[in-house]
Image (tube, rainbow, N blue to C red):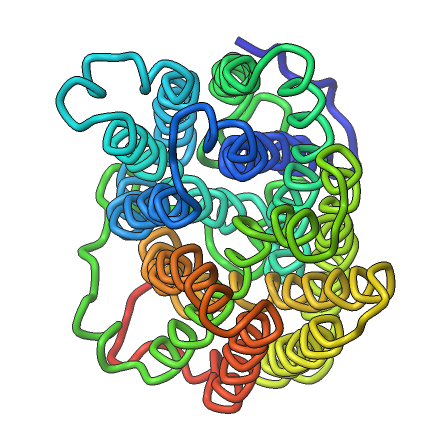
């Protein structure tokens, strides 16, 4: 049990520690997601797997991740982000470590090597599905109305950090200690972070011994203190279905997911196979898009909060979403068709940065629409992203084989542009259809 803080007239800063812990969970989430795209270089010849089979293994993770987004978010709304995130991180960390064992485990005897890896990656996806919806559940509880875009963007910027760290570190571990070691280490780190989260976090600021009344009041804003303890509201599925903004949001985030998974699954191999980089050098430059994500993600989150405060939610969210997705499309097109490798990397990295510039706007809208159901709505939105993402890892190498990398990346740019146009129809100020009481 944490000791209480000394009485102070100023708001405490515990919410930023909560966000820092969520950031660390976000980092390990993406280490566990991206490391297989680096180890694939050694796994494929060692295990006799083709590019298409490896793409199917990538897609199986995304399928499990997509299918369990809504249940993961609903569980967070029902039982709280503290418990659900703890269980989820431990779950996927165990199966991350099992990735190294899958080719020689009993699963390989049942499904063969290819099938055993698909099963394990699917189960990692099931666990990680609870991550982002519960990040947003925690941010909804722990950030004031004018800090939510920045708060969730800070948290999700762990995607960039984890993905930037993973290529060079995983490649070095793989070359020196074997690809299996990368999975053992990642699984161990995940369990440790899960236990720290459970020890420090609470679901409500008012329950935390290090939160004073000033910070609790700041977080609540104009919302009255929670009065429905232990009585979660029924999920208003009909209101969700009747809200046009929600479906345009899902469409746009589906496009986002397709593009994001091109970077997460194939960017490293694109540099090695198409641009001629060595294994280790390619791993270093494969970090570039993720560094851009880390910078642009909180910048977009901060800006969407500032614009929303001055111009209202409709403009504050949609302007950021529209601009970021459109600039991502333009940057990817330029990067795909420039001959000079380093200039191409610069534009493709900007494409990733502009894509993640929109994250604060995307993830704030479920809370804007209904704070009580932020986890469930976030899961619904992220289901779209990962249905798009489940298509991307398999379609990308097929397009490359048929038409080349320029066309494959051009399809990604077209998806980003469609996602930009969808923002013209997203109006969070209109709220959910029907009368939804907030607790």
Question: Horizontal placement of 89 versus 359: left or right?
Answer: left
Q: Nearer the viewer, residue 31 or 307?
A: 31
Question: In the rendered view, does 17 fall on the left or right side of 393?
Answer: right
- Front one among 403 and 230: 403
**Which residue occupies 51% across, 65% down?**
400
Q: Is residue 227 visible?
A: no
Please determine whether, in this image, residue 125 is positioned above or below residue 8.
below
Q: Is residue 332 left or right of residue 255?
A: right
Residue 436 in the figure: left or right of residue 97: left
Q: At x 53% / y 71%, what residue is drawn?
A: 408
Location of residue 95 with respect to 331 vertically, above or below:
above
Q: Residue at x 70, y 81 (%)?
A: 330
Question: Which quadrant holds residue 316?
Answer: bottom right
Quick one: quadrant of the C terminus?
Answer: bottom left
Residue 410 x/y as whole percent: 58, 77
Percent x, y of residue 117:
32, 30
Vertical relation: 109 (above or below) 239? above
Q: Nearer the viewer, residue 404 or 303?
A: 404
Q: Residue sitting at 75 percent across and 60 percent down? A: 349
Q: Position of residue 199 (x, y in %)?
A: 51, 15
């Amino acid at each position: 049990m944490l000791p209480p803080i000394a009485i102070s007239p100023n708001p405490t800063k515990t919410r930023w520690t909560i966000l820092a812990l969520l950031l660390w969970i976000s980092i390990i989430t993406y280490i566990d997601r991206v490391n297989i795209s680096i180890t694939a270089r050694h796994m494929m010849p060692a295990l006799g797997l083709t590019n298409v089979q490896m793409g199917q293994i990538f897609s199986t993770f995304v399928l499990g991740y997509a299918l369990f987004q809504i249940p993961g978010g609903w569980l967070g709304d029902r039982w709280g982000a503290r418990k659900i995130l703890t269980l989820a991180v431990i779950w996927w960390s165990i199966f991350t470590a099992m990735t190294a064992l899958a080719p020689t485990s009993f699963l390989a005897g049942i499904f063969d090597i290819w099938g055993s890896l698909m099963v394990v990656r699917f189960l990692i996806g099931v666990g990680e599905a609870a991550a982002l919806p519960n990040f947003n559940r925690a941010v909804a509880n722990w950030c004031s109305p004018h800090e939510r875009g920045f708060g969730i963007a800070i948290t999700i910027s762990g995607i960039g950090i984890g993905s930037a760290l993973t290529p060079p570190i995983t490649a070095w571990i793989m070359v020196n200690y074997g690809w299996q070691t990368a999975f053992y280490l990642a699984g161990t780190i995940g369990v440790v972070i899960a236990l720290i989260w459970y020890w420090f976090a609470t679901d409500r600021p008012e329950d935390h011994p290090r939160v004073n009344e000033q910070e609790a009041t700041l977080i609540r804003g104009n919302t009255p203190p929670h009065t429905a303890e232990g009585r979660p509201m029924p999920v208003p599925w009909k209101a969700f279905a009747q809200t046009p903004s929600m479906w345009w949001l899902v469409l746009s985030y589906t496009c986002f997911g397709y593009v994001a998974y091109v970077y997460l699954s194939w960017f490293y191999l694109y540099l090695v196979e198409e641009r001629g980089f060595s294994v280790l050098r390619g791993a270093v430059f494969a970090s570039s898009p993720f560094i851009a994500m880390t910078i642009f993600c909180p910048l977009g989150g901060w800006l969407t909060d500032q614009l929303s405060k001055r111009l209202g939610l409709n403009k504050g969210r949609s302007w950021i979403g529209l601009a970021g997705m459109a600039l991502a499309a333009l940057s990817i097109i330029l990067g795909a068709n420039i001959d000079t490798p380093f200039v191409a990397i610069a534009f493709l990295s900007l494409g990733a940065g502009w894509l993640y510039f929109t994250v604060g706007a995307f993830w704030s809208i479920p809370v804007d629409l209904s704070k009580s159901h932020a986890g469930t709505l976030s899961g619904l939105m992220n289901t779209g992203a990962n249905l798009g993402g489940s298509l991307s890892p398999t379609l990308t190498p097929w397009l490359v084989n048929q038409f080349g990398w320029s066309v494959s990346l051009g399809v990604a740019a077209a998806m980003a542009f469609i996602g930009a146009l969808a923002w013209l129809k997203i109006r969070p100020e209109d709220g959910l259809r029907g009368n939804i009481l907030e607790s």
